[in-house]
Every structure is written in structure tokens, then in C-alpha cells.
Image: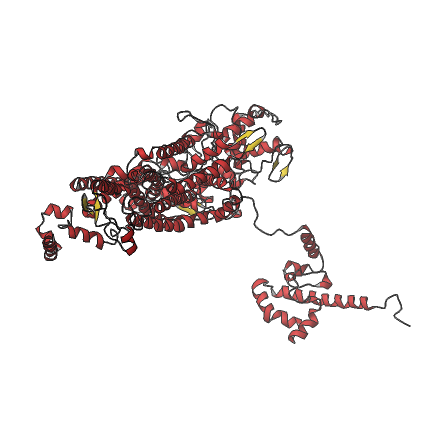
């Protein structure tokens, strides 16, 4: 072992990169500039690189598998990166004033070089990010990945789950604030519906809406508030929390699926031995502090992060970019008439990810004996509030055994997962109804049913 | 595992490259490039390659800040002001010259009159018969849909945005007919239009602003459009809205169309006042001010009013009163000039100093003859003043004291 390491170090010292390159065939030089030749080199590559240093030098095979995590967290981060870059360029081209906002978006669509592409990519990536972050949460729940496993120092997965819930809410807010910026009818009325739901909360509802809008109507004050939130405060918060989220994953001992190996190791190994005692009384009473050792081979089934993790990361990054661009070319970003407070479109819909809330508001609004139940309060505030609170508190009440951590749909967590899946299905169904089945006057229309003609001037 | 992933990486990388190439291709193969190339060919053929080289390429636009319009129509319609392409096919035809003389492109752009979506650089979007754009190009396509014989008639609706206060405008036959009908049928008996009229029917001053959703299309056959509703309503009000008490005037379909265009032109367009025909941009004096000036013009001091001396000076003894009173009253100029300048009035007026030298040199260039006239009149004024003083100072009927 020792001699092998020394020879490895020697080899890496002696053979410089240039020499190695010179020895490699031409096609390899053109396609792959550098390949670590020893484990030490591979580890160094991770540690020395600023961007890669938050990865471990070695990573387990199950963490890398496609089927366990679907890489949804990574995809969210890549989408955030695409959004940051396209958004940064769009900031040079968009004017956040009620007089110019709509015109500057029209300019993007029609006369700015690649403006249609930038705007389309930004929009699609934003929608994808909402969807992917949600799916990421679903994955983490179904695999029980918010639970602490082996008693490792500083492990606190429930905290990271809460950070994740906050990140989901921030993602929704980011998308929601961006929704207003084109200043067309779609934007204006979606924000009207969204903020009206918020205002139905008792006591703090109206003040919240007032602060958010900078007044009682959606005007210039609202636009600039949403713009600053969208371009500065929320992205900054996202960046900070995502960094913390990633750091916590390592602090918590990697992905939850790695917990299995500790469980397995425990079973395989002989019962833990009390190896040391620290007190005299303990020696006499035989009840002192034990340092228990579970011996597991940490290196078993582990591969160097470079190139195994980095290549997969590159694949995921490029695939995400590919999918976003492909969808951008497929779907044209809508831009309706300029915002007009005097004309309410029929139907007026919130952004699609809030349509399940709008549906809930509809369902919970009913009249019993002359008294109308305010759906906006029950469906728009209380129910989603309860859902978020339940999500935050769930890890602390989930008493499923440690052996269920990091596995898809384990028997031990059957009931938790059933309840969760029912809620997810309800949200998806309501979103579908709101998006595809609500027509004029909020009547139900089958997706294949035609709405009545939209009136025009000519 | 690694080599499999590497293959995936190459496949996705190459696909991404192809996709990027497609984005580049789409950006650089827009229709307007084809139109510009074709126009260049046409010019080369007709006028030679030298003139073709002068044609600008890339997105072209006319920006009229006053009207807040950016019209990129000229990206494809490049021949607007070219001579010799009057009969070329569109979009390469020269714009009719007469109308451009009064309405230059740089001041009006295109969509102010024609309609359409000026920002756009693709044909369907630019011509505006698309979803979410309510101002299509008012030309052949829309005219044919409504069976309007004259394809330029619809455009008169846009002309009337500026010409709304004209009684009659040259070349706007439909709108002129409609304006005549408004007088003939006395629409103002029931409706207020531009602040004048009755209150039985709704105020029509901004009828063109009424949103499309606020019309009831339930009894309308055919397309649900404001124009169709207006035409049907003018032809038979009760058919479209049964509760209406508006009489059926038995209008012909062309008259109904004309009236529909007129009421739809009544919008709150943000048009600067200098664009609106018939609006006088000056301060109009009040009737009182006019009467006073007229009175002064007929009095003895008419000379000082005609020559605008009264802008600064009163000549109170001759009945001339200055509103501003910037200079001294000229009633006692004969002595006042002597006091102020140490010169006689005759001498001073012939060769003035100070403010008067500037005024008489630039604003009121009096001839020598006129100056003599002024001197003579001012002497009369002084005489008059003295007389008035004596009159006022004469012993009053009440005894001054004992």
C-alpha cells in the first residue's frame, strides 16, 4: 500500500502534463485533453478546482446512478445557471417602466438579434425549473431522504429538507415576479389573480398585498418592485441557499442512498465492541461511555469523482441545455396585448403553477343558506399554508425506521408515501383542470371542446 | 461506466452543436432578408447595380417619437420614396406621392394611417391579422372580409384620429359621408359627441375606446367583431340590442359602414395637439379684450394701438390703456422726456437712446413721417392732460371752507 502510493506520487511528479499529452494519440488529444492516470491525480483534480471542490474526491456508485436521484437537483441548478446567464443579458435589453416594458419585449421578439431566443430560453427554463424543483422534492420525499441515518457528526437532513422547501417557495416567487415583467394582458391579470389570493389572508393579507404592489393597484411601483425582486434579491437568496443546500448534502454524509451501506455493514459485522471507557466508575459499573465502531470499507464501490462524477455532470448539464433549447424552438413564447387594467380577459388565470390554488379557491367558494364561504381564505391561504407547514414539520414526525432511508417506495414508509402521493396527484389534477379545462366565466370545458369566439375589433 | 458516459457526452455535445446551428440558421433566414434581396435584384435590373448598392440592408425602421411609434414596415417595403417604381408589385411599390407631401414618413410613419403591427418583422405579425393584435393593416384583406368596395375606405378610420374635428377632409369620402349623416339625422338629439348633444343615448365621444368584450354578439351572425356589430347596429339597432330605443334610419350598408368607421375612430389616441387638424395652437383673446382693443382703435389714440406702442405704454389722456404698463404713461411725455433725458421730445424720438433706441430699431420701425405724427399726437395728449387737470382742479360746488 505504502510503496504503491509513493510510486504514484513519483509518477505524477515525474511525468508532466505536457509529456503525457505528447505520448497520447492525436484523436485523443483532440477529444479529451486530460485524463488522470492515478487516483491521486483524480482526487487532486477535484480538490484544486474552485468549481468542483465541493464534491468529494471519491463518490459511491449508487450516488451516481441515474435511477436513484434522476439528477433532479443538478438539473435545477443547471436551469438556474441558464436563467442567470440569459437573464443577465435580458437585463440589458428590458426596460422596467410601464411605458416601455411591453415595447422592449416586442423589440426582443422582433428586432433584437437572437432576442426571441434569449426570451424563449429564459421563459422555458423558468417553467422547467418550477417543474424540476417540484419533482426533486417529490423524489426526496418518496425516498425518505430527509431522514437522518447513522449517527454521524453534524448530520441534519431535516434542516436541509426545510432549506429545500424554502428554495421551492423562492423558485415559485422568482417565476411569479418574472411573470409580470412583459407587461402584457397575460402578465397583468395573472399577477392580479395571484395577489388577490394573497390578500384574502386575515389581518396580514391586505398589508402584504399593499407592500408587494407598492400601492393598491398594479402600476409602476409594482413593476419596479417585482423587477428588483426578480433580478436581484431572489436570485441572490437562491444562490446563497443553493450553495448551503449543496454543502449540507456533503455535511450530511452524501446522498441518503449511501445510508444503506452502513445498515448493511452493521448487519454483516459482528456486534459493535465497546472499545474504550473513560471513567473509573464506568469500569466498575460497566456502564461508561462507549465508543462503538462499525467497521465498514468506505472505499468499497467508490470511484474517483474525476472523471466519473464530472463526466456525468457534463452530460446532465448539456442534456438540460439541449432540452431547454429544443423546447424553446418548439414553443413560441406568448405575448398578448399590452396590459390594460380596464379589460379583464375571460378567463383570467394565474400562472400555471398556481392554478391548483385558483381551483381550490373555486371549489371552496360555496353558498350555504345565504352565507358565502370565502374560498380565497380556505383554498388560497389556509390549505396551502397547512401544506407548507406539514412539509416543514414532516421529518420530525416521520418515525419510519432508519432502514427505509434512501430507497424508492420502501414498505416501511407505505402510509407516508401514500398520503404524499395523493396530495401530489391532487395538485397535478387541479393544475391540469385549471390549465386545460377552465374556459370563459371559469366554466368547465373539455380539452377538445372549443371555447366561444374571442371578440375582435375587425 | 466511464466510457459509456463519455459516448453520451459526445452524442449530446454534437446534438447541442447541431441545435445551436439551427438557432443560428433560424435567426439568419428571416423572410425580410429574402424581400430585401429581391428588391435589390429589381433595382439592379431597372436602375443598374450602382443604385442597388445604395439600398440599406438589415432591419429598417421609422421612429416617430411624438407619436410613440416604431414602424419596421420599411424593412420590406423599401421603395416608399423611390421614383420609378409606381407600378412595381408590392412590397416594392412607391408610395403615392401626393399624400406623403402632407404626411411625411418621418413625421407620421406607417401604422398611424395603415394600421398593422409596426414592431414586427414577419409578414403575418406585421400585417396584424394575428391573435392579440387589434389593429390589423386596414387594406384589402379586411375590406374583402366585410365586402367593402373601396379597399382604402377602412383606412379613413385611422385618418380621422387627427382629422376628427374637420367638417370635411379631402379624400376621406366614407368619413365625410358619415359626418354629414351625423348632422342630417341629428344624432346629437340623443347622443353627446365631443361635449355637445343630448343625454338620451350614451355619450359617443370615445365610442372607439369601448373594449371588444363590452359588446353583446349574441344576436350577430358571422364573426364576433366590433366593426361587424357597429354595422349591424346602424342598419337595425333593435336586431342587435332589442332594448334599444334608437330608431331604424334605413341606412344603406355603405352608409352603415361609414358610420361604423366614424364611431370607431373616436378614440383617446395620445396624439400631440400639433398633429390634430383644425386645432389652433394660440392664446385666444377674450371677448372683453377684443372689444377694448377695438374701442381704443377707434379713439384718438388709434395711432399708438396700431403701432403696438400700447403694449408697454398707456396714453391715458387719449383713452389708450396698456395692460402691461411696462413704460411710463405717454400723456405727459412732452415734459417727462425733458426731465428724464434732458432733451426735447422731438429730438429724442428722432434719435432715441436706451430701451427706446432698441425698440424703435427692431420691433417698431417707425418712418420719419410716423415719428413726426407721434410727436404731434403726444403734444395733443399733453394738452389734453392739462385740460383734464384743470377741469378736475376747478372749484367744486361745495365750498372749500369758511
Question: How many tags in the picture?
Answer: 0
Q: B55 and A45: which one is in front?
A: A45
Residue pictured at 64% horizontal, 65% vertical: B326
Q: Is residue B317 left or right of residue B141?
A: right
Q: A63 and B353: which one is in front?
A: A63
**Vertical arrangement, residue B71 with respect to residue B379, above or below:** above
**Vertical arrangement, residue B280 with respect to residue B184, above or below:** below
Q: Residue furthest right?
A: B402
Color style of the picture? secondary structure
Residue B98 at least partly seen: no
Residue B96 place in picture, x, y as percent: 42, 39
Q: Residue furthest bottom?
A: B342
Residue A194 place in picture, x, y as percent: 46, 40
Residue A189 place in picture, x, y as percent: 47, 39
Residue pictured at 55% horizontal, 30% vertical: A367
Residue A177: quarter of image: top left
**Vertical arrangement, residue A201 with respect to residue A290, above or below:** above
Q: Is residue B157 left or right of residue A31?
A: right
Residue B350 at least partly seen: yes
Residue B99: quarter of image: top left
Q: A38 and A440: which one is in front?
A: A38
Q: B316 and A455: which one is in front?
A: A455
Q: Is residue A75 left or right of residue B8?
A: right
Residue B24 place in picture, x, y as percent: 27, 42
Amino acid at each position: 500500500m505504502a510503496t504503491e502510493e509513493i510510486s504514484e506520487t513519483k509518477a505524477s511528479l515525474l511525468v508532466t502534463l505536457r509529456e503525457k499529452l505528447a505520448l497520447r494519440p492525436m484523436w485523443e488529444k483532440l477529444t479529451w485533453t486530460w485524463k488522470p492516470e492515478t487516483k491521486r491525480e483524480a482526487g487532486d483534480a477535484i480538490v484544486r478546482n474552485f468549481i468542483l471542490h465541493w464534491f468529494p474526491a471519491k463518490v459511491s456508485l449508487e450516488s451516481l446512478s441515474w435511477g436513484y436521484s434522476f439528477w433532479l437537483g443538478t438539473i435545477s441548478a443547471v436551469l438556474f445557471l441558464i436563467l442567470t446567464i440569459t437573464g443577465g443579458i435580458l437585463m440589458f435589453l428590458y426596460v422596467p417602466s410601464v411605458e416601455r416594458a411591453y415595447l422592449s419585449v416586442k423589440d426582443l421578439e422582433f428586432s433584437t438579434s437572437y432576442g426571441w431566443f434569449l426570451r424563449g430560453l429564459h421563459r422555458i427554463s423558468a417553467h422547467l425549473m418550477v417543474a424540476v424543483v417540484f419533482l426533486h422534492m417529490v423524489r426526496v420525499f418518496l425516498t425518505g431522504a430527509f431522514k437522518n441515518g447513522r449517527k454521524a457528526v453534524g448530520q441534519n437532513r431535516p434542516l436541509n429538507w426545510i432549506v429545500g422547501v424554502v428554495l421551492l417557495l423562492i423558485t415559485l416567487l422568482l417565476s411569479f415576479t418574472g411573470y409580470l415583467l412583459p407587461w402584457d394582458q397575460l402578465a397583468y391579470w395573472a399577477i392580479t389573480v395571484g395577489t388577490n389570493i394573497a390578500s384574502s389572508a386575515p389581518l396580514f393579507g391586505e398589508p402584504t398585498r399593499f407592500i408587494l404592489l407598492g400601492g393598491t393597484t398594479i402600476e409602476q411601483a409594482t413593476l419596479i418592485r417585482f423587477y428588483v425582486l426578480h433580478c436581484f434579491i431572489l436570485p441572490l437568496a437562491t444562490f446563497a441557499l443553493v450553495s448551503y443546500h449543496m454543502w449540507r448534502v456533503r455535511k450530511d454524509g452524501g446522498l441518503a442512498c449511501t445510508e444503506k451501506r452502513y445498515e448493511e455493514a452493521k448487519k454483516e459485522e459482528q456486534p459493535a465492541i465497546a472499545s474504550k471507557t473513560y471513567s473509573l466508575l464506568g469500569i466498575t459499573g460497566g456502564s461508561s461511555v462507549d465508543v462503538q465502531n462499525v467497521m465498514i470499507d468506505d472505499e468499497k464501490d467508490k470511484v474517483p469523482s474525476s472523471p466519473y462524477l464530472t463526466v456525468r455532470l457534463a452530460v446532465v448539464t448539456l442534456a438540460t441545455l439541449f432540452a431547454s433549447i429544443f423546447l424553446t424552438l418548439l414553443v413560441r413564447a406568448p405575448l398578448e396585448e399590452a396590459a390594460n387594467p380596464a379589460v379583464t380577459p375571460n378567463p383570467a388565470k394565474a400562472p400555471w403553477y398556481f392554478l391548483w390554488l385558483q381551483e381550490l379557491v373555486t371549489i371552496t367558494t360555496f353558498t350555504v343558506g345565504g352565507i358565502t364561504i370565502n374560498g380565497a381564505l380556505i383554498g388560497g391561504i389556509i390549505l396551502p399554508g397547512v401544506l407548507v407547514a406539514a412539509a416543514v414539520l414532516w421529518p420530525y414526525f416521520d418515525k419510519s425506521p432508519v432502514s427505509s432511508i434512501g430507497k424508492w417506495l420502501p414498505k416501511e414508509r407505505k402510509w407516508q408515501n401514500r398520503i404524499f402521493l395523493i396530495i401530489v396527484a391532487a395538485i397535478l389534477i387541479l393544475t391540469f383542470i385549471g390549465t386545460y379545462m377552465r374556459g370563459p366565466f371559469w366554466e368547465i370545458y373539455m380539452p377538445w371542446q372549443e371555447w366561444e369566439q374571442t371578440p375582435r375589433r375587425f | 461506466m466511464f466510457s459509456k458516459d463519455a459516448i453520451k457526452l459526445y452524442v449530446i455535445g454534437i446534438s447541442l452543436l447541431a441545435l445551436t446551428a439551427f438557432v443560428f440558421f433560424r435567426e439568419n433566414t428571416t423572410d425580410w432578408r429574402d424581400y430585401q434581396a429581391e428588391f435589390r435584384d429589381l433595382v439592379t435590373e431597372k436602375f443598374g447595380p450602382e443604385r442597388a448598392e445604395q439600398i440599406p440592408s438589415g432591419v429598417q425602421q421609422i421612429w416617430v417619437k411624438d407619436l410613440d411609434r416604431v414602424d419596421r414596415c420599411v424593412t420590406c417595403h423599401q421603395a416608399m420614396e423611390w421614383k420609378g417604381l409606381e407600378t412595381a408589385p408590392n412590397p416594392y411599390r412607391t408610395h403615392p406621392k401626393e399624400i406623403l407631401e402632407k404626411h411625411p414618413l418621418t413625421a407620421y410613419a406607417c401604422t398611424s394611417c395603415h394600421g398593422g403591427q409596426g414592431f414586427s418583422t414577419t409578414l403575418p405579425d406585421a400585417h396584424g391579422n394575428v391573435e392579440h393584435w387589434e389593429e390589423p393593416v386596414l387594406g384589402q384583406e379586411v375590406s374583402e372580409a366585410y365586402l367593402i368596395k373601396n379597399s382604402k375606405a377602412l383606412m379613413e378610420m385611422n385618418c380621422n384620429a387627427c382629422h376628427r374635428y374637420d367638417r370635411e377632409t379631402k379624400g376621406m369620402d366614407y368619413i365625410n359621408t358619415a359626418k354629414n349623416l351625423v348632422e342630417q339625422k341629428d344624432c346629437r338629439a340623443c347622443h353627446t359627441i365631443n361635449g355637445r348633444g343630448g343625454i338620451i343615448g350614451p355619450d359617443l365621444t370615445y365610442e372607439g375606446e369601448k373594449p371588444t368584450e363590452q359588446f353583446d354578439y349574441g344576436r350577430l351572425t358571422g364573426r364576433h367583431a366590433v366593426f361587424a356589430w357597429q354595422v349591424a347596429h346602424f342598419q337595425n339597432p333593435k336586431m342587435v340590442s332589442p332594448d334599444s330605443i334608437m330608431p331604424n334610419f334605413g341606412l344603406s350598408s355603405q352608409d352603415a359602414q361609414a358610420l361604423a368607421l366614424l364611431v370607431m375612430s373616436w378614440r383617446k389616441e395620445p396624439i400631440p395637439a400639433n398633429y390634430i387638424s383644425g386645432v389652433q395652437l394660440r392664446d385666444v383673446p377674450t371677448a372683453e379684450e377684443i372689444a377694448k382693443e377695438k374701442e381704443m382703435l377707434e379713439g384718438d389714440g388709434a395711432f399708438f394701438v396700431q403701432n403696438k406702442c400700447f403694449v408697454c405704454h398707456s396714453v391715458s389722456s387719449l383713452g389708450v390703456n396698456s395692460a402691461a404698463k411696462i413704460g411710463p404713461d405717454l400723456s405727459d411725455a412732452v415734459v417727462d422726456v425733458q426731465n428724464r433725458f434732458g432733451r426735447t421730445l422731438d429730438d429724442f424720438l428722432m434719435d432715441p437712446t436706451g430701451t427706446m433706441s432698441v425698440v424703435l430699431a427692431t420691433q417698431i420701425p417707425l418712418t420719419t413721417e410716423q415719428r413726426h405724427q407721434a410727436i404731434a399726437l403726444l403734444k395733443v395728449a399733453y394738452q389734453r392732460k392739462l385740460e383734464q387737470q384743470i377741469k378736475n382742479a376747478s372749484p367744486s360746488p361745495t365750498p372749500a371752507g369758511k
